[in-house]
Amino acid sequence: MTHRDLDVYKESMKFVGEIYKLTREFPKFEMFGLASQMQRAAVSIPSNIAEGASRNGSKEYIHFLSISTGSASEIETQLGIVEILGYCNEPQDVNRLIHEVNSIRMKLILMMKSLEKRLGKK
């Protein structure tokens, strides 16, 4: 089994596509601002899952999952900013994306707890 088999990885990859689709709606002046920052944070989630899975040992994996979790929190904040600025024509899309990123974050936290438990048993 590899990182590609993990549901959280698959969900985070799909989420990246949704963030890119959303940021296409932003004003052109945001291309190198909020849009770029959101895209980088979204890409960071599956990228760090993959990098952590390729490392030796649970401790390193937990570190990279922690970075993914931080990126998920960052994106949640940025989605709130999108809502405040009115950059999305469909406010329910922002709410759906917030729900999705929270689900991803919770799965990452559960993975970290499971790995930490495994570390404690050694």
Image: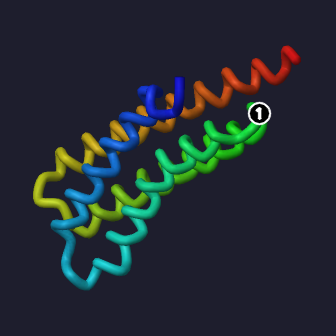
Q: Nearer the viewer, residue 11 or 55?
A: 55
Q: Look at the image and name its color scheme.
A: rainbow
The x, y position of residue 103, in whole percent, is 42, 32
Residue at far bottom of view: 29
Q: Which residue is mark 1?
A: 57
Residue 112, position as x, y percentages in the image? 65, 30
Q: Residue at x 34, y 51 (%)?
A: 16
**Image mark count:** 1
Residue 40 placed where, x, y %? 44, 63
Mark 1 residue type: Gly
Q: Which quarter of the picture shows residue 80?
A: bottom left
Q: Residue furthest left?
A: 89
Residue 101 shows in the view: yes
Q: Is residue 64 left or right of residue 21?
A: right
Residue 69 in view (yes/no): no
**Which residue is at the far top?**
121
Q: Residue at x 38, y 34 (%)?
A: 10
Residue drawn where x is 29% and y is 55% of the image: 19
Is 15 left, or right, of 54 in this rendering?
Answer: left
* Vertical arrangement, residue 24 with respect to residue 13, above or below: below
